[in-house]
Amino acid sequence: MDDISTIPESVWLQLTGEVELCYYTDDLTKTEASFNIETEPFTLEEEWADKDIEVLYYTDDPTITESVVSIETDPFTLAQEWEDKEIKIIEYTDDPNQTESTITIETEPFTIYDELGDSVDVLYYTDDPSKTSAELNITANYSPLDELEGDFDVVTWTNDEEVIAGNRDMMLTYHALPFEQLIVQATDIALYGDLKKIVATKVTENSPEGTLRMAASFDSGLTWKTYRFNKWFDMDMKYITLFKRKGMNLDTLNAIPEKDLIGLTRIAYYFDSSKHYENSYLLDEVKMVVDAPRHAVEFRDMSLQLLNTTATINLTFSGNKLTGVLDDADQGKVKYRVLLNGKTYYPADGNFTRLVASPFNIELNIDERNVNFGVENILKVEFQDYWGAVESRETKFIGSYSGLMFMDESGDFLSDTFGGILKQLDYGVIIAGQTTLTKKVRIKNMLGYAVDHVYLEMDKKFETDGVEVQLSRQADPFLPIDYLTYGLIQPEDSIDFYIRIATDIHAKPNPNGNFEMKVTADRV
């Protein structure tokens, strides 16, 4: 072709991919050729997006030893460029005296425990032949109680008559740091206008601060996002460690511009106070600045009618423990008190408890020393809402012990709830060298809840030379073993086992020999 300018645009559009233009001339004086190409407007950023750019520079000036290329881009930070990437820094020096290098990097505050976790292996090396051992001293704010997980019971005993009579309560005081908490807003933020800004403030303290991170949702909690480098990133709430590392801090949340807050519906919070040293993070408040509509509907004369729904309660009594939920459909505050056989039981002064937010869980152990055994007892719960409407519920029960209770084959209890002996399993006089008759013992679950991993054994401190207390799951044949284990036992269920005493001819006489059995189990 002698002239390509005659080719119409529609024909050029048929070409796809990379297009090459070849130019030929036999003019020996021609050193270059140029083409004018007309396209839709675009920028180098669009053309070079996601591509590596190489800049080649040539000069025959022998005095030029280096060249500089200046590229203008949108503002960015090294944190954006290196996010989630491994950074390697190489230093070169011809100083033969330099033996080490130091690199200082400024990051968000963190502790060595955030970086290393709860377990660290320490390796120690020395070429000193006289060194035979190494010591590592670590100072930390730690207590063995930190290892307790889940709910636990604290059991104590007293002979204080005032406490036994119910005139004074026993008090337990403890100090602890909360576990890390992820608090997710349960409902959408009620906004009556356009959200302009979020203002979060903290309670200032002199002690080191714990960790506070936040995330936002734009779809009522289905997905969550964090704001980094002036844009939103998706974040999986299932991974607490990821939330702790990439969630928003207080300053980031406060700095989000109005255009990026459109559609925000919920906020989630992560709190963590390190157990290794005293610190905390106290969030004072989170305020929404909203451009609310003004000069709208005005009310001049208005009357209010107060409608009150009476509080309700759901009670269960088992194993001498009263449990239930006290609720108010108005979502108001509630209070209650408990009477046993017509007498004040809780609180001891006879007044109602203080008002608490509903729904409120009631868990109250009934001291069996206040219960009438073998006859009917009446437990009454009176409850009241914020407006004073009083209701009550009663439950009746036959007084008995609670716990994993030992009984003989006639059904008599051998011990009480607190381990006190009610009746001996008496074997009478035992002649040295003889084995006693077998006695059946029953253990009954009177805790009010199911238990598992039941473990029965004799108390080792009562062992006597020449005398052996033997246990068996069955009477015939009697198969002696040191301990017994059982699986799941539901409330009010029982299991039977058998005990006998074997002696040898050299057993020393004991006019009042005793042995005791103990049982442990896990709550289901």
Image (spheres, helix red, strand yellow):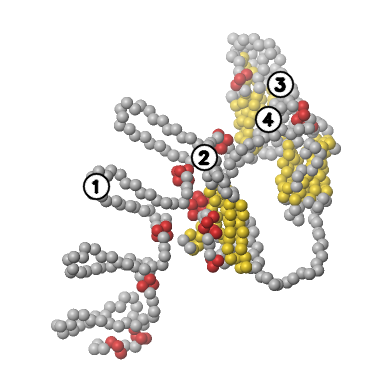
Q: Disc 4 residue type?
A: Thr
Residue holding disc 3: 425
- Outermost residue, bottom direction? 6
- Residue 276 has which mark? 2
Q: Residues within 10 Å of mark 2 (few under 14, many from 20)?
A: some
Q: Disc 2 residue type?
A: His
Residue holding disc 1: 95
- Residue 156 has which mark? 4
Q: Nearer the viewer, residue 486 or 85?
A: 85
Circle nearer the N terminus (2, 1): 1
Cα distance in 3D space between marks 4 and 2: 30 Å
What percent of the width, then of the height, locates residue 34? 25, 81
Circle nearer the N terminus (4, 3): 4
Mark 2 lies on a secondary structure that is loop
Circle nearer the N terminus (4, 1): 1
Q: Residue 297 is drawn in which quadrant?
A: bottom right
Q: Residue 288 is drawn in which quadrant?
A: bottom right
Cα distance in 3D space between marks 3 and 2: 52 Å
